[in-house]
Image (cartoon, rainbow, N blue to C red):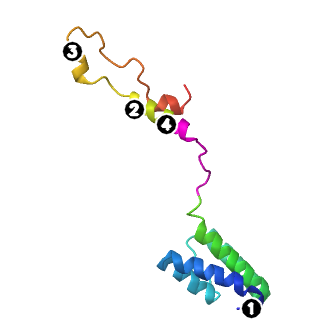
Amino acid sequence: MFKRHVHYYEGFHALLTARGPKFLDALNLFENNRSPPATDRLDHQRRQDADALLSVDDERRCVACAESLVRRSLTHLVPLHQSHKSFRTKQKLAKAQKQNRPVPQWIRLRTGNAIRYNAKRRHWRKTSLNI
């Protein structure tokens, strides 16, 4: 690698070797300046464009290859959008979920009991449709 990008490369090397065999394969491809095999036509075209970019300039190749490698290796680790719920909200939702159940049989069978069913029972589909 080039002196200018050695620290950049070493960071990715450490990152990928710590992640396991799948990432070591990606690292080997990265070191040999080759793209992984394409899975579909669009992916193949993207990789061809990337390979064309790689042949333009060595310095640009190093940066472009490293960035695409990181993007490919980290995409499955980051959720699409994070849920921002406080612990209090989570507790409230958990309690509501616990209460949303049928009345137990032993309560129905008690002497003098008028409760036959849970009047506040709610189906999950109504909640998801905001009804």
Residue at position x 39%, y 17% from top? 119
Q: Amino acid at mark 2?
A: Lys
Mark 3 or mark 4: name the one nearer the start of the chain: 4
**What is the residue that sits farthest to the front in this orientation?**
88
Q: Which mark is residue 34?
A: none
Q: Which residue is mark 4?
A: 91
Q: Position of residue 54 (x, y in %)?
A: 73, 84
Neighbours of disc 1 within 10 Å: few (<14), some (14-19), many (20+): few
Q: Nearer the viewer, mark 3 or mark 1?
A: 3
Q: Amino acid at mark 4?
A: Gln
Mark 3 or mark 2: name the one nearer the start of the chain: 2
Q: Are marks 3 and 1 in contact (CB under 8 Å)?
A: no
Q: Which residue is mark 2?
A: 98
Q: Position of residue 66 (x, y in %)?
A: 68, 79
Answer yes or no: is residue 37 visible: no
Describe residue 41's horizontal placement relative to residue 96 as left or right. right
Residue closer to the observer: 119 or 89 = 89
Q: Which residue is mark 3?
A: 110
Q: Which residue is mark 1?
A: 2
Residue at position x 32%, y 18% from top? 117
Q: Is residue 35 placed above or below 93 in the rendered structure?
A: below
Q: Position of residue 46 (x, y in %)?
A: 68, 73
Answer yes or no: is residue 71 visible: yes
Spatial CA distance of label 3 from label 4 is 31 Å
Mark 4 or mark 2: name the one nearer the start of the chain: 4
